Image: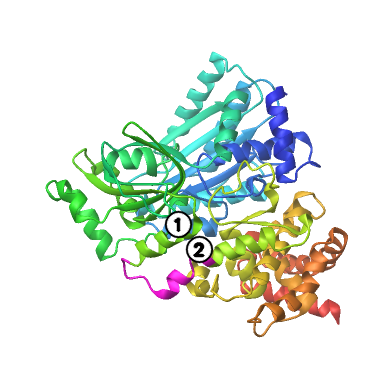
Amino acid sequence: METVIQSLLEAFQTDQGLSGRPQDEAFEVFATFCVLNTFCNDTFDPDTYRTGGGNDLGIDAYAVVIEGQMYREPDDVRAAMQASKQPRVQFVIIQAKTSSRFEGKVISDLAENLSHLCGPDQELPYEVSDEVSGLRECVEVVFDDPVRLAGRLPELHVRYVTTGDQIAKMITQKARSAEKALGRLNRFETVDVRCVNWRELRTLYGRALSTVRVTVPMPRQFPLPEAPGVKQSFVGLISAPTLVSEMLVDDAGNLRQQLFESNVRAFQGYNAVNTGIRETLRDPVKRQRFAVMNNGITIVAREMKLVGEKFVLDDFQIVNGCQTCHVLFHERDQLTDEVFVSVHIVHSTDEDVIQGIVAATNQQTPVSDEDLAAREDFHKGLEDHFALGRTTKEHRLFYERRAKQYSGNKDVEQTRVISRGQLSRAYLAMFLDEPARVGRYQELIKARGKELFVAGQPQVLYYTAAVTWYRLEWLIRNQHIARGYRPAQHHLMALIRERLIGPIRKLPGNDRAAEKLCVPILEVMWDEAKAEKLVNELLPAVQRAIDAEKKAGVPLSQAVRTTRFAERARRELNGARR
Protein backbone atom coordinates (compact mmCIF):
# COMPACT_ATOMS: atom_id res chain seq x y z
CA MET A 1 0.00 0.00 0.00
CA GLU A 2 1.25 3.49 -0.84
CA THR A 3 2.94 4.94 2.26
CA VAL A 4 0.88 8.16 2.35
CA ILE A 5 -2.39 6.23 2.24
CA GLN A 6 -1.02 3.76 4.78
CA SER A 7 -0.34 6.56 7.25
CA LEU A 8 -3.71 8.23 6.58
CA LEU A 9 -5.49 4.90 6.99
CA GLU A 10 -3.76 4.26 10.32
CA ALA A 11 -4.74 7.73 11.56
CA PHE A 12 -8.30 7.15 10.34
CA GLN A 13 -8.46 3.79 12.13
CA THR A 14 -7.42 5.48 15.37
CA ASP A 15 -9.95 8.31 14.94
CA GLN A 16 -12.76 5.92 14.05
CA GLY A 17 -11.91 3.22 16.60
CA LEU A 18 -11.10 0.67 13.88
CA SER A 19 -7.62 -0.35 15.01
CA GLY A 20 -8.71 -3.94 15.54
CA ARG A 21 -10.19 -4.35 12.05
CA PRO A 22 -8.41 -6.19 9.22
CA GLN A 23 -6.75 -3.79 6.82
CA ASP A 24 -9.06 -4.57 3.90
CA GLU A 25 -12.19 -3.84 5.99
CA ALA A 26 -10.66 -0.67 7.40
CA PHE A 27 -9.79 0.48 3.89
CA GLU A 28 -13.39 -0.07 2.77
CA VAL A 29 -14.60 2.13 5.61
CA PHE A 30 -11.93 4.73 4.78
CA ALA A 31 -12.89 4.80 1.09
CA THR A 32 -16.58 5.03 2.03
CA PHE A 33 -15.88 7.98 4.32
CA CYS A 34 -13.89 9.82 1.64
CA VAL A 35 -16.31 9.23 -1.23
CA LEU A 36 -19.60 9.81 0.59
CA ASN A 37 -18.33 13.07 2.08
CA THR A 38 -18.33 14.47 -1.46
CA PHE A 39 -22.09 13.89 -1.63
CA CYS A 40 -23.16 14.76 1.92
CA ASN A 41 -21.63 17.20 4.38
CA ASP A 42 -23.39 15.90 7.50
CA THR A 43 -21.57 13.82 10.10
CA PHE A 44 -22.15 10.10 9.52
CA ASP A 45 -20.72 6.72 10.49
CA PRO A 46 -19.18 5.32 7.28
CA ASP A 47 -19.22 1.76 8.62
CA THR A 48 -23.02 1.73 8.53
CA TYR A 49 -22.96 2.21 4.75
CA ARG A 50 -20.77 -0.83 4.10
CA THR A 51 -22.34 -4.05 2.91
CA GLY A 52 -19.97 -6.59 4.50
CA GLY A 53 -20.12 -10.35 4.13
CA GLY A 54 -20.64 -12.32 0.91
CA ASN A 55 -23.01 -12.10 -2.04
CA ASP A 56 -22.47 -8.36 -2.29
CA LEU A 57 -22.00 -8.39 -6.09
CA GLY A 58 -18.82 -6.36 -5.75
CA ILE A 59 -20.61 -3.54 -3.89
CA ASP A 60 -18.63 -2.67 -0.78
CA ALA A 61 -20.79 0.32 0.20
CA TYR A 62 -23.72 2.32 -1.10
CA ALA A 63 -25.93 5.27 -0.28
CA VAL A 64 -29.00 6.89 -1.77
CA VAL A 65 -28.63 10.67 -1.64
CA ILE A 66 -31.86 12.67 -1.86
CA GLU A 67 -31.63 16.45 -1.75
CA GLY A 68 -28.18 16.19 -0.16
CA GLN A 69 -29.23 13.77 2.61
CA MET A 70 -28.03 10.17 2.68
CA TYR A 71 -30.28 7.15 3.15
CA ARG A 72 -29.84 3.40 3.12
CA GLU A 73 -33.18 1.92 4.14
CA PRO A 74 -36.14 1.68 1.72
CA ASP A 75 -38.60 3.26 4.20
CA ASP A 76 -36.30 6.26 4.65
CA VAL A 77 -35.97 6.61 0.89
CA ARG A 78 -39.76 6.45 0.49
CA ALA A 79 -40.29 9.18 3.11
CA ALA A 80 -37.64 11.42 1.52
CA MET A 81 -39.15 10.96 -1.94
CA GLN A 82 -42.62 11.85 -0.66
CA ALA A 83 -41.28 14.98 1.02
CA SER A 84 -40.12 16.53 -2.26
CA LYS A 85 -42.10 17.13 -5.45
CA GLN A 86 -39.13 16.77 -7.79
CA PRO A 87 -36.24 15.44 -5.73
CA ARG A 88 -32.66 15.20 -6.87
CA VAL A 89 -31.68 11.56 -6.37
CA GLN A 90 -28.15 10.18 -6.51
CA PHE A 91 -27.18 6.53 -6.15
CA VAL A 92 -23.59 6.18 -4.96
CA ILE A 93 -21.90 2.79 -5.34
CA ILE A 94 -18.41 2.07 -3.97
CA GLN A 95 -15.99 -0.75 -4.70
CA ALA A 96 -12.77 -0.52 -2.65
CA LYS A 97 -9.67 -2.70 -2.86
CA THR A 98 -6.26 -2.38 -1.23
CA SER A 99 -4.72 -3.55 -4.51
CA SER A 100 -2.10 -1.28 -6.06
CA ARG A 101 -3.65 -1.56 -9.52
CA PHE A 102 -7.00 -1.25 -11.24
CA GLU A 103 -8.54 -4.27 -12.95
CA GLY A 104 -10.79 -4.04 -15.97
CA LYS A 105 -12.71 -7.17 -14.98
CA VAL A 106 -13.78 -5.52 -11.71
CA ILE A 107 -15.38 -2.65 -13.64
CA SER A 108 -17.08 -4.95 -16.16
CA ASP A 109 -18.45 -7.29 -13.49
CA LEU A 110 -19.68 -4.42 -11.34
CA ALA A 111 -21.43 -2.81 -14.32
CA GLU A 112 -23.15 -6.08 -15.18
CA ASN A 113 -24.29 -6.60 -11.59
CA LEU A 114 -25.59 -3.03 -11.36
CA SER A 115 -27.53 -3.46 -14.60
CA HIS A 116 -29.45 -6.28 -12.90
CA LEU A 117 -29.87 -4.40 -9.61
CA CYS A 118 -30.93 -1.11 -11.16
CA GLY A 119 -32.78 -2.41 -14.20
CA PRO A 120 -36.55 -2.90 -14.48
CA ASP A 121 -36.39 -6.71 -14.28
CA GLN A 122 -38.04 -8.02 -11.13
CA GLU A 123 -35.95 -11.15 -10.62
CA LEU A 124 -32.23 -11.05 -9.84
CA PRO A 125 -30.18 -13.83 -11.45
CA TYR A 126 -27.94 -14.14 -8.39
CA GLU A 127 -28.36 -14.73 -4.68
CA VAL A 128 -27.59 -11.49 -2.86
CA SER A 129 -27.00 -10.38 0.70
CA ASP A 130 -29.65 -8.59 2.77
CA GLU A 131 -27.78 -5.30 2.29
CA VAL A 132 -27.72 -5.60 -1.50
CA SER A 133 -31.35 -6.68 -1.45
CA GLY A 134 -31.99 -3.46 0.47
CA LEU A 135 -30.31 -1.48 -2.30
CA ARG A 136 -32.56 -3.16 -4.84
CA GLU A 137 -35.61 -2.16 -2.76
CA CYS A 138 -34.34 1.43 -2.59
CA VAL A 139 -34.09 1.51 -6.38
CA GLU A 140 -37.65 0.20 -6.70
CA VAL A 141 -38.93 2.81 -4.24
CA VAL A 142 -37.33 5.64 -6.22
CA PHE A 143 -38.80 4.47 -9.53
CA ASP A 144 -42.16 3.60 -7.97
CA ASP A 145 -43.43 7.17 -8.40
CA PRO A 146 -42.53 8.32 -11.92
CA VAL A 147 -44.36 11.64 -11.50
CA ARG A 148 -41.71 12.79 -9.01
CA LEU A 149 -39.00 11.90 -11.54
CA ALA A 150 -40.65 13.82 -14.37
CA GLY A 151 -38.25 16.74 -14.06
CA ARG A 152 -35.05 14.79 -13.53
CA LEU A 153 -34.10 11.12 -13.47
CA PRO A 154 -31.75 9.84 -10.75
CA GLU A 155 -27.97 9.99 -11.14
CA LEU A 156 -25.72 6.96 -10.78
CA HIS A 157 -22.22 7.50 -9.40
CA VAL A 158 -19.86 4.52 -9.25
CA ARG A 159 -16.45 4.79 -7.57
CA TYR A 160 -13.77 2.12 -7.91
CA VAL A 161 -11.13 2.92 -5.30
CA THR A 162 -7.67 1.35 -4.99
CA THR A 163 -4.28 2.32 -3.59
CA GLY A 164 -2.84 2.39 -7.12
CA ASP A 165 -1.53 5.43 -8.93
CA GLN A 166 -1.65 4.96 -12.70
CA ILE A 167 -5.00 4.53 -14.42
CA ALA A 168 -4.28 2.78 -17.71
CA LYS A 169 -5.98 3.82 -20.93
CA MET A 170 -7.71 0.43 -21.07
CA ILE A 171 -9.17 0.97 -17.58
CA THR A 172 -10.54 4.36 -18.63
CA GLN A 173 -12.09 2.77 -21.70
CA LYS A 174 -13.68 0.08 -19.51
CA ALA A 175 -15.19 2.82 -17.33
CA ARG A 176 -16.64 4.62 -20.37
CA SER A 177 -18.02 1.32 -21.67
CA ALA A 178 -19.64 0.67 -18.29
CA GLU A 179 -21.26 4.13 -18.40
CA LYS A 180 -22.75 3.41 -21.82
CA ALA A 181 -24.03 0.00 -20.74
CA LEU A 182 -25.71 1.39 -17.63
CA GLY A 183 -26.99 4.39 -19.58
CA ARG A 184 -28.85 2.04 -21.91
CA LEU A 185 -31.13 1.14 -19.00
CA ASN A 186 -32.75 4.56 -19.62
CA ARG A 187 -33.21 5.00 -15.88
CA PHE A 188 -30.54 7.59 -15.11
CA GLU A 189 -30.04 11.22 -16.00
CA THR A 190 -26.28 10.68 -15.86
CA VAL A 191 -23.99 7.72 -15.20
CA ASP A 192 -20.55 8.47 -13.82
CA VAL A 193 -18.06 5.61 -13.38
CA ARG A 194 -14.79 6.83 -11.96
CA CYS A 195 -11.56 5.22 -10.81
CA VAL A 196 -10.11 6.84 -7.67
CA ASN A 197 -6.37 6.43 -7.18
CA TRP A 198 -4.42 7.11 -4.00
CA ARG A 199 -3.72 10.74 -4.93
CA GLU A 200 -7.40 11.59 -5.40
CA LEU A 201 -8.26 9.58 -2.29
CA ARG A 202 -5.83 11.70 -0.28
CA THR A 203 -7.47 14.87 -1.63
CA LEU A 204 -10.95 13.59 -0.80
CA TYR A 205 -9.85 12.78 2.75
CA GLY A 206 -8.48 16.28 3.22
CA ARG A 207 -11.75 17.80 2.00
CA ALA A 208 -13.77 15.52 4.27
CA LEU A 209 -11.92 16.83 7.32
CA SER A 210 -12.16 20.51 6.45
CA THR A 211 -14.93 22.98 7.07
CA VAL A 212 -16.57 24.78 4.17
CA ARG A 213 -14.36 27.47 2.66
CA VAL A 214 -15.56 29.64 -0.22
CA THR A 215 -14.28 32.62 -2.17
CA VAL A 216 -17.05 34.96 -3.30
CA PRO A 217 -16.61 38.12 -5.38
CA MET A 218 -18.69 41.04 -4.12
CA PRO A 219 -17.67 44.14 -6.06
CA ARG A 220 -20.59 46.19 -4.71
CA GLN A 221 -19.96 46.38 -0.97
CA PHE A 222 -19.13 48.81 1.80
CA PRO A 223 -17.94 48.35 5.42
CA LEU A 224 -20.12 49.00 8.43
CA PRO A 225 -18.87 50.93 11.50
CA GLU A 226 -16.90 49.11 14.18
CA ALA A 227 -18.93 47.28 16.82
CA PRO A 228 -17.97 45.44 20.05
CA GLY A 229 -17.27 41.75 19.42
CA VAL A 230 -17.34 42.21 15.64
CA LYS A 231 -14.04 42.15 13.78
CA GLN A 232 -15.45 43.31 10.44
CA SER A 233 -18.86 43.75 8.88
CA PHE A 234 -19.94 44.47 5.31
CA VAL A 235 -23.13 45.00 3.35
CA GLY A 236 -23.24 44.49 -0.39
CA LEU A 237 -24.73 42.83 -3.42
CA ILE A 238 -23.79 39.46 -4.92
CA SER A 239 -25.11 38.22 -8.23
CA ALA A 240 -27.51 35.34 -7.62
CA PRO A 241 -25.75 32.87 -9.99
CA THR A 242 -22.45 33.53 -8.19
CA LEU A 243 -24.03 33.10 -4.77
CA VAL A 244 -25.46 29.73 -5.78
CA SER A 245 -22.42 28.36 -7.61
CA GLU A 246 -19.69 29.64 -5.29
CA MET A 247 -21.36 29.36 -1.89
CA LEU A 248 -24.57 27.34 -1.79
CA VAL A 249 -23.60 24.35 -3.95
CA ASP A 250 -20.94 21.76 -3.11
CA ASP A 251 -18.69 19.86 -5.52
CA ALA A 252 -21.40 17.25 -6.11
CA GLY A 253 -23.98 19.90 -7.03
CA ASN A 254 -25.94 19.52 -3.78
CA LEU A 255 -27.18 22.33 -1.59
CA ARG A 256 -24.92 22.69 1.47
CA GLN A 257 -27.56 22.05 4.10
CA GLN A 258 -25.07 22.46 6.96
CA LEU A 259 -24.87 26.20 6.20
CA PHE A 260 -28.36 26.66 7.65
CA GLU A 261 -27.99 24.92 11.01
CA SER A 262 -28.24 28.22 12.89
CA ASN A 263 -31.57 29.12 11.28
CA VAL A 264 -34.55 28.77 13.56
CA ARG A 265 -36.58 27.21 10.77
CA ALA A 266 -35.65 24.73 8.09
CA PHE A 267 -36.97 25.26 4.56
CA GLN A 268 -40.75 25.53 4.85
CA GLY A 269 -41.57 24.36 1.35
CA TYR A 270 -43.56 26.45 -1.08
CA ASN A 271 -45.82 28.35 1.26
CA ALA A 272 -47.18 31.73 0.23
CA VAL A 273 -43.92 33.58 0.94
CA ASN A 274 -41.62 31.13 -0.81
CA THR A 275 -43.99 30.82 -3.74
CA GLY A 276 -43.81 34.60 -4.07
CA ILE A 277 -40.00 34.48 -4.12
CA ARG A 278 -40.12 31.82 -6.82
CA GLU A 279 -42.58 33.78 -8.94
CA THR A 280 -40.38 36.87 -8.69
CA LEU A 281 -37.36 34.91 -9.95
CA ARG A 282 -39.37 33.50 -12.84
CA ASP A 283 -40.62 36.92 -13.96
CA PRO A 284 -38.11 38.54 -16.39
CA VAL A 285 -38.91 42.03 -15.11
CA LYS A 286 -39.50 41.45 -11.40
CA ARG A 287 -36.30 39.45 -10.89
CA GLN A 288 -34.29 42.55 -11.83
CA ARG A 289 -35.77 44.13 -8.68
CA PHE A 290 -35.01 41.09 -6.51
CA ALA A 291 -32.44 42.88 -4.33
CA VAL A 292 -35.01 45.50 -3.28
CA MET A 293 -37.95 43.09 -2.97
CA ASN A 294 -36.15 40.53 -0.80
CA ASN A 295 -34.56 40.98 2.64
CA GLY A 296 -31.47 39.08 1.51
CA ILE A 297 -29.26 36.92 3.67
CA THR A 298 -27.03 37.32 6.72
CA ILE A 299 -23.75 35.42 6.97
CA VAL A 300 -21.66 35.01 10.11
CA ALA A 301 -18.08 33.84 9.50
CA ARG A 302 -15.62 32.81 12.18
CA GLU A 303 -12.79 33.26 9.69
CA MET A 304 -12.81 35.86 6.92
CA LYS A 305 -10.33 37.58 4.63
CA LEU A 306 -10.98 40.34 2.12
CA VAL A 307 -8.70 40.07 -0.91
CA GLY A 308 -9.48 42.88 -3.31
CA GLU A 309 -13.18 42.53 -4.01
CA LYS A 310 -13.31 38.86 -2.99
CA PHE A 311 -14.40 37.55 0.39
CA VAL A 312 -12.74 34.35 1.58
CA LEU A 313 -15.08 32.79 4.16
CA ASP A 314 -14.23 29.84 6.39
CA ASP A 315 -16.38 28.15 9.05
CA PHE A 316 -19.43 30.25 8.30
CA GLN A 317 -23.20 29.99 8.64
CA ILE A 318 -26.11 31.62 6.84
CA VAL A 319 -28.01 32.64 9.95
CA ASN A 320 -30.89 34.32 8.15
CA GLY A 321 -32.14 33.74 4.62
CA CYS A 322 -32.64 29.97 4.62
CA GLN A 323 -35.90 30.27 2.65
CA THR A 324 -34.39 32.62 0.07
CA CYS A 325 -31.34 30.40 -0.45
CA HIS A 326 -33.42 27.27 -0.98
CA VAL A 327 -35.60 28.95 -3.58
CA LEU A 328 -32.52 30.38 -5.34
CA PHE A 329 -31.04 26.88 -5.44
CA HIS A 330 -34.23 25.36 -6.83
CA GLU A 331 -34.50 28.12 -9.46
CA ARG A 332 -30.78 28.20 -10.31
CA ASP A 333 -31.47 27.49 -13.98
CA GLN A 334 -33.65 30.63 -14.13
CA LEU A 335 -31.05 32.97 -12.66
CA THR A 336 -29.24 35.58 -14.73
CA ASP A 337 -26.59 38.19 -13.94
CA GLU A 338 -29.44 40.70 -13.63
CA VAL A 339 -30.50 39.06 -10.35
CA PHE A 340 -28.72 40.36 -7.25
CA VAL A 341 -29.02 39.34 -3.60
CA SER A 342 -28.47 41.69 -0.68
CA VAL A 343 -25.86 40.20 1.66
CA HIS A 344 -24.73 41.16 5.15
CA ILE A 345 -21.43 39.53 6.17
CA VAL A 346 -20.30 39.61 9.81
CA HIS A 347 -16.88 38.41 10.93
CA SER A 348 -16.95 37.41 14.60
CA THR A 349 -15.59 34.70 16.90
CA ASP A 350 -17.53 35.89 19.95
CA GLU A 351 -20.22 33.22 20.54
CA ASP A 352 -22.45 35.61 22.48
CA VAL A 353 -22.35 38.10 19.61
CA ILE A 354 -23.05 35.34 17.08
CA GLN A 355 -26.06 34.05 19.02
CA GLY A 356 -27.32 37.61 19.41
CA ILE A 357 -27.20 38.03 15.64
CA VAL A 358 -29.06 34.74 15.17
CA ALA A 359 -31.80 35.79 17.58
CA ALA A 360 -32.08 39.34 16.23
CA THR A 361 -32.26 38.39 12.56
CA ASN A 362 -34.82 35.67 13.20
CA GLN A 363 -37.01 37.97 15.28
CA GLN A 364 -37.59 40.01 12.14
CA THR A 365 -39.84 37.17 10.92
CA PRO A 366 -42.78 35.66 12.83
CA VAL A 367 -40.84 33.17 14.98
CA SER A 368 -42.22 32.17 18.35
CA ASP A 369 -40.36 32.59 21.64
CA GLU A 370 -40.35 28.79 21.96
CA ASP A 371 -38.50 28.47 18.63
CA LEU A 372 -35.88 30.95 19.74
CA ALA A 373 -35.49 29.29 23.15
CA ALA A 374 -34.64 26.04 21.40
CA ARG A 375 -31.69 27.65 19.68
CA GLU A 376 -28.05 27.72 20.51
CA ASP A 377 -28.05 28.50 24.23
CA PHE A 378 -29.30 25.01 25.07
CA HIS A 379 -27.09 23.37 22.47
CA LYS A 380 -24.03 25.29 23.61
CA GLY A 381 -24.78 24.17 27.16
CA LEU A 382 -24.91 20.57 25.94
CA GLU A 383 -21.59 21.01 24.17
CA ASP A 384 -19.97 22.24 27.40
CA HIS A 385 -21.63 19.53 29.49
CA PHE A 386 -20.36 16.78 27.20
CA ALA A 387 -16.78 17.98 26.82
CA LEU A 388 -16.14 19.76 30.12
CA GLY A 389 -18.71 18.47 32.58
CA ARG A 390 -16.97 15.14 33.21
CA THR A 391 -14.09 14.66 35.60
CA THR A 392 -12.04 12.26 33.46
CA LYS A 393 -11.02 12.28 29.82
CA GLU A 394 -12.34 8.74 29.38
CA HIS A 395 -15.87 9.94 30.19
CA ARG A 396 -15.93 12.81 27.70
CA LEU A 397 -17.96 12.93 24.54
CA PHE A 398 -18.23 15.78 22.07
CA TYR A 399 -21.57 17.18 20.97
CA GLU A 400 -21.33 18.59 17.45
CA ARG A 401 -23.38 21.79 17.32
CA ARG A 402 -22.04 22.73 13.89
CA ALA A 403 -21.29 20.40 10.99
CA LYS A 404 -17.68 19.16 11.01
CA GLN A 405 -17.00 21.19 14.14
CA TYR A 406 -14.40 18.69 15.29
CA SER A 407 -13.21 17.38 11.92
CA GLY A 408 -9.45 17.35 11.68
CA ASN A 409 -9.06 18.04 15.41
CA LYS A 410 -6.36 15.58 16.46
CA ASP A 411 -7.23 16.07 20.12
CA VAL A 412 -10.73 14.67 19.58
CA GLU A 413 -11.34 10.98 18.91
CA GLN A 414 -13.94 11.09 16.14
CA THR A 415 -15.88 8.12 17.49
CA ARG A 416 -16.68 10.26 20.54
CA VAL A 417 -18.38 12.93 18.43
CA ILE A 418 -22.18 12.78 18.26
CA SER A 419 -24.20 14.94 15.91
CA ARG A 420 -27.51 16.63 16.64
CA GLY A 421 -29.44 14.06 14.60
CA GLN A 422 -27.73 11.12 16.29
CA LEU A 423 -28.32 12.60 19.74
CA SER A 424 -31.98 13.29 18.93
CA ARG A 425 -32.53 9.66 17.93
CA ALA A 426 -30.69 8.36 20.98
CA TYR A 427 -32.72 10.52 23.40
CA LEU A 428 -36.03 9.70 21.69
CA ALA A 429 -35.31 5.97 21.78
CA MET A 430 -34.04 5.82 25.32
CA PHE A 431 -36.06 8.32 27.31
CA LEU A 432 -39.18 8.91 25.21
CA ASP A 433 -39.80 5.22 24.40
CA GLU A 434 -39.59 5.71 20.64
CA PRO A 435 -37.02 3.12 19.44
CA ALA A 436 -39.27 2.09 16.55
CA ARG A 437 -40.13 5.51 15.18
CA VAL A 438 -36.54 6.81 15.06
CA GLY A 439 -36.40 4.92 11.76
CA ARG A 440 -39.05 7.34 10.50
CA TYR A 441 -37.16 10.32 11.82
CA GLN A 442 -38.91 13.22 10.09
CA GLU A 443 -42.32 11.87 11.03
CA LEU A 444 -41.17 11.47 14.64
CA ILE A 445 -39.69 14.97 14.79
CA LYS A 446 -43.01 16.43 13.63
CA ALA A 447 -44.80 14.48 16.35
CA ARG A 448 -42.42 14.94 19.27
CA GLY A 449 -39.79 17.46 18.20
CA LYS A 450 -41.07 20.02 20.70
CA GLU A 451 -39.93 17.70 23.50
CA LEU A 452 -36.30 17.91 22.36
CA PHE A 453 -33.68 20.44 23.49
CA VAL A 454 -36.08 22.37 25.67
CA ALA A 455 -34.64 25.05 27.94
CA GLY A 456 -34.43 23.75 31.49
CA GLN A 457 -34.25 20.05 30.60
CA PRO A 458 -31.52 18.23 32.59
CA GLN A 459 -28.55 17.91 30.27
CA VAL A 460 -27.41 14.69 31.90
CA LEU A 461 -30.33 12.88 30.23
CA TYR A 462 -28.93 13.75 26.81
CA TYR A 463 -25.42 12.86 27.96
CA THR A 464 -26.60 9.47 29.21
CA ALA A 465 -28.34 8.72 25.92
CA ALA A 466 -25.16 9.72 24.08
CA VAL A 467 -22.99 7.49 26.28
CA THR A 468 -25.28 4.51 25.64
CA TRP A 469 -25.21 5.21 21.90
CA TYR A 470 -21.41 5.48 22.01
CA ARG A 471 -21.00 2.20 23.89
CA LEU A 472 -23.23 0.25 21.50
CA GLU A 473 -21.34 1.74 18.55
CA TRP A 474 -18.10 0.69 20.23
CA LEU A 475 -19.32 -2.88 20.75
CA ILE A 476 -20.46 -3.20 17.13
CA ARG A 477 -17.42 -1.47 15.66
CA ASN A 478 -15.03 -3.67 17.62
CA GLN A 479 -17.05 -6.79 16.76
CA HIS A 480 -17.94 -7.63 20.36
CA ILE A 481 -21.48 -8.07 19.09
CA ALA A 482 -22.45 -8.95 15.53
CA ARG A 483 -22.94 -5.97 13.18
CA GLY A 484 -26.17 -7.65 12.08
CA TYR A 485 -27.75 -6.26 15.25
CA ARG A 486 -27.07 -2.66 14.21
CA PRO A 487 -30.62 -2.12 12.84
CA ALA A 488 -31.91 -2.94 16.35
CA GLN A 489 -29.46 -0.59 18.07
CA HIS A 490 -32.10 1.88 19.31
CA HIS A 491 -34.23 -0.99 20.62
CA LEU A 492 -31.20 -2.16 22.60
CA MET A 493 -30.91 1.34 24.07
CA ALA A 494 -34.51 1.17 25.25
CA LEU A 495 -33.91 -2.28 26.75
CA ILE A 496 -30.75 -1.08 28.52
CA ARG A 497 -32.77 1.64 30.21
CA GLU A 498 -35.55 -0.85 30.99
CA ARG A 499 -33.15 -3.30 32.60
CA LEU A 500 -31.12 -0.79 34.62
CA ILE A 501 -33.72 1.71 35.84
CA GLY A 502 -37.07 0.32 34.70
CA PRO A 503 -39.90 2.18 32.96
CA ILE A 504 -40.14 5.96 33.32
CA ARG A 505 -43.56 7.49 33.78
CA LYS A 506 -42.27 11.03 33.98
CA LEU A 507 -38.77 12.36 33.32
CA PRO A 508 -37.17 14.30 36.19
CA GLY A 509 -37.28 18.03 35.76
CA ASN A 510 -34.24 18.99 37.82
CA ASP A 511 -30.54 18.17 37.53
CA ARG A 512 -30.19 16.43 40.90
CA ALA A 513 -33.01 13.95 40.31
CA ALA A 514 -31.89 13.33 36.72
CA GLU A 515 -28.31 12.67 37.80
CA LYS A 516 -29.52 10.13 40.35
CA LEU A 517 -31.68 8.44 37.71
CA CYS A 518 -28.81 8.17 35.23
CA VAL A 519 -26.04 6.96 37.55
CA PRO A 520 -26.84 3.22 37.17
CA ILE A 521 -26.74 3.51 33.38
CA LEU A 522 -23.53 5.55 33.28
CA GLU A 523 -21.73 3.22 35.68
CA VAL A 524 -22.43 0.24 33.42
CA MET A 525 -21.94 1.95 30.07
CA TRP A 526 -18.54 3.38 30.97
CA ASP A 527 -17.34 -0.06 32.06
CA GLU A 528 -16.54 -2.00 28.87
CA ALA A 529 -16.82 -5.44 30.47
CA LYS A 530 -20.08 -4.68 32.31
CA ALA A 531 -21.60 -3.09 29.22
CA GLU A 532 -20.72 -6.05 27.01
CA LYS A 533 -22.07 -8.50 29.60
CA LEU A 534 -25.36 -6.57 29.86
CA VAL A 535 -25.85 -6.30 26.10
CA ASN A 536 -25.17 -10.02 25.65
CA GLU A 537 -27.85 -10.69 28.26
CA LEU A 538 -30.30 -8.55 26.28
CA LEU A 539 -29.53 -9.95 22.84
CA PRO A 540 -31.54 -13.20 23.26
CA ALA A 541 -34.70 -11.14 23.81
CA VAL A 542 -33.95 -9.11 20.70
CA GLN A 543 -33.14 -12.24 18.73
CA ARG A 544 -36.43 -13.90 19.69
CA ALA A 545 -38.25 -10.79 18.48
CA ILE A 546 -36.24 -10.91 15.24
CA ASP A 547 -37.02 -14.61 14.76
CA ALA A 548 -40.74 -14.05 15.29
CA GLU A 549 -40.82 -11.26 12.70
CA LYS A 550 -38.73 -13.28 10.27
CA LYS A 551 -41.14 -16.21 10.63
CA ALA A 552 -43.95 -13.83 9.70
CA GLY A 553 -42.01 -12.78 6.61
CA VAL A 554 -40.95 -9.35 7.89
CA PRO A 555 -37.26 -8.50 7.28
CA LEU A 556 -35.30 -6.95 10.14
CA SER A 557 -34.94 -3.56 8.41
CA GLN A 558 -38.75 -3.23 8.40
CA ALA A 559 -39.45 -4.98 11.70
CA VAL A 560 -37.39 -2.55 13.78
CA ARG A 561 -39.60 0.30 12.57
CA THR A 562 -42.73 -1.14 14.17
CA THR A 563 -43.99 -0.69 17.72
CA ARG A 564 -44.90 -4.38 17.53
CA PHE A 565 -41.20 -5.27 17.46
CA ALA A 566 -40.40 -2.91 20.35
CA GLU A 567 -43.21 -4.33 22.49
CA ARG A 568 -42.27 -7.92 21.64
CA ALA A 569 -38.62 -7.32 22.58
CA ARG A 570 -39.71 -5.76 25.88
CA ARG A 571 -42.05 -8.68 26.62
CA GLU A 572 -39.30 -11.16 25.81
CA LEU A 573 -36.96 -9.32 28.18
CA ASN A 574 -39.42 -9.12 31.03
CA GLY A 575 -40.55 -12.71 30.47
CA ALA A 576 -36.96 -13.94 30.68
CA ARG A 577 -36.48 -12.05 33.96
CA ARG A 578 -39.48 -13.78 35.52
Residue at x-position 43% and y-position 69%: 372
Q: Nearer the viewer, residue 535 or 297?
A: 297
| Whether residue 444 is situated above or below residue 115 in the rendered picture | below
Left or right: residue 215 versus residue 206 is: left
Q: Is residue 260 left or right of residue 505?
A: left
- For the residue pair 513 and 280, the one nearer the viewer reads as 513
Residue at image x 35%, y 67%? 363
The three-letter amino acid code for the residue at tag 2 is: Glu
* Residue 275 counted in the magenta span: no
Q: Is label 1 in contact with label 2 (beta carbons under 8 Å)? A: yes
State the separation of the CA atoms marked 1 and 2: 10 Å
Q: Position of residue 306 (x, y in %)?
A: 38, 36
Judge the density around disc 2: few (<14), some (14-19), many (≥20) Cα neighbours within 10 Å.
Answer: many
* Res. 354 mark: 1
- Residues shaded magenta: 364-377
Q: Identify the residue at the far top of this view.
A: 169
Q: What is the number of the mark on residue 376?
A: 2
Residue 317 in the image, given as x and y percentages of width and height = 44, 51
Q: Secondary structure at mark 2?
A: helix
- The C terminus lies in quadrant: bottom right
User: Can see residue 214?
Assistant: yes
Q: Residues within 10 Å of mark 1 (few under 14, many from 20)?
A: many
Percent position of residue 391, x then y: 77, 62
Q: How is the image coloured?
A: rainbow
Left or right of residue 207, residue 293 in this image: left
